Image (cartoon, helix red, strand yellow):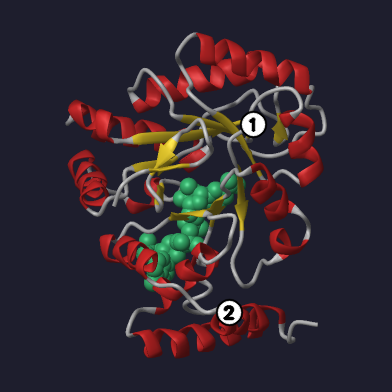
Amino acid sequence: MNTELLAAGGPALSPIVAGAWRMADWHLTAAQRLRWIEQCVELGVTSFDHADIYGGYAVETLFGEALALAPALRERLQLVSKCGIRLVDRARPAHRVKHYDTSAAHLIASAEASLRALRTDRLDLLLIHRPDALMDADEVARAFESLRAAGKVRHFGVSNFTPAQFELLASRTPLVTNQIELHPLRREPIHDGTLDQLQRLRLRPMIWSPLAGGALLAGGDAAARRVQAVLAEIAASHRVSSATVAFAWLLRLPSRPLPLAGSRRIEALREAVAALALRLDAQEWTALWQAGSGQEVP
Ligand SMILES: NC(=O)c1ccc[n+]([C@@H]2O[C@H](COP(=O)([O-])OP(=O)(O)OC[C@H]3O[C@@H](n4cnc5c(N)ncnc54)[C@H](OP(=O)(O)O)[C@@H]3O)[C@@H](O)[C@H]2O)c1
C-alpha cells in the first residue's frame, strides 16, 4: 500500500491512517508501542494522527518514547498533529475553563511542544483541532507561515470546520484537509456542503471515529443496531468483516476520504486496510445510509 496525495501539493499519506488518540488507555510499554507502530507500517499504515491534548497531553510523548527506540523509522512515517484546544487538566494547571486558543503564540508553542514530544524535527501536517469563535484568520496564517518557513511543519489544515469556517481560513492560507466525523450514524457532512466543498477544491477529507467509536459494531441505540444488522448482511455477502464494510462505506465517497483507524488491535487495522479492495455498489451504500437515518432517501 503506497502513500497518496491528500491535496495536489501534498502531503502524501497512507490511505488508512492510524489514530493515536486512545494510546494512553492501552497501557503498553514503550517496546509494545513500537511493535504496534511497526505492525501498522508492515500493513502499509504509515501515517499517524495525533493531537497535543490526546491522553491528557500524554500520547505524543508515549509515541515519541517508542520512536526513540528505533529512530530510523521516522523517515518511513508521516506524522499529523493538532492544536488549538486548551483542556482543564492536571498537566495544564493554568487552565480554568476548557477553551480554544488560535493565537499565533499558542499555535507555534503547541507545534514546537508536539515536535519535542514526538521526538521529531518536523510534522507532515498540523490541523486546527476545532473552530474557534475568536480565531483571527490573518494571525493563524502568519503562524502557519512562520512554522512552514522554519521547516517545522510541512502542511496545514483544519478539523471540525463548517464550509464557511473553512472558506474563511482558506482565503488567507492554503489548507489541505478538513478532518471530520463521518459514518452512517453521522451523515451531516454529506448533506451540509462539507464534502462538496472538499471535492470542489480537490482536497481529501480525513475521517475520525469511522466506526463511531465502536458503536457500528456493538452496543448503541436502535439506529446503531439497524446499522450493525445491515453491515453484517453486506459483510456476509462479500465474506469480509462488518468493520471492513464500514470503512468501504467511507472510501466509496467521491471526495476520497482517508479514514483514521483508532484500534490498538492490529487485526482491526487489517480489517480497515481490507476495505481498500472492496467497492460497495450504490444500493449497498444507500442501505447503510438508510439504516443510519431510519428512512429511505427522498
Ligand atoms: N479531529 C477530531 O476532533 C478527532 C476526534 C476523535 C478522534 N480523532 C482521531 O480519530 C481516530 C479514530 O477515532 P476512534 O478511535 O474513535 O475510531 P473508531 O475506529 O471509530 O473507534 C475505535 C474504537 O472502537 C473499538 N472497536 C470495537 N470493535 C472494533 C472493531 N471490530 N474494529 C475496530 N475497532 C473496534 C476500538 O477498540 P479496540 O482498540 O479494542 O479495537 C476502539 O476503542 C483517533 O485515534 C484520533 O486520531 C479525531
Q: Which of the two marks, 1 or 2, is nearer to us in this view?
A: 2
Label whose residue precedes the other's in the sequence (1 or 2)? 1
Label 2 sits on what residue type? Ala
Q: Is residue 217 visible?
A: yes
Q: Nearer the viewer, residue 40 or 219?
A: 40
Crowding near the residue tagged with mark 2, few <14, some 14–19, many ≥20 C-alpha atoms within 10 Å: few
Residue 41 percent coordinates (x, y): 25, 46
Residue drawn 78% across and 58% down? 192
Image position, residue 234 (x, y; %): 46, 86
Q: Mark 1 falls on what kind of element?
A: strand
Point 74% across, 29% down: residue: 169
Residue kind at label 1, given as amino acid type = Arg
Which residue is depicted at the point 30% across and 61% down?
Answer: 265
The image shows residue 116, relative to residue 88, as above or below, that is above
Asked whether 235 or 10 is in front, the reply is 10
- In the rendered structure, the answer to whether residue 197 lies left or right of residue 13 reads right
Checking the image for residue 282, the label placed there is: 2
Q: Nearer the viewer, residue 4 or 258?
A: 4
Instruction: State how many labels appear.
Output: 2
Q: Is 32 positioned to the left or the right of 275 in the image?
A: left
Give the image quarter of residue 37: top left
Crowdedness near tag 1: few (<14), some (14–19) or many (≥20) residues, C-alpha within 10 Å: some
Q: Please identify the quadrant where the C terminus is shown.
A: bottom right
Q: Secondary structure at mark 2?
A: helix
Residue shown at the point (68%, 39%) measured from the top left: 130
The label on residue 86 is: 1
Vertical relation: 131 (above or below) 254 = above
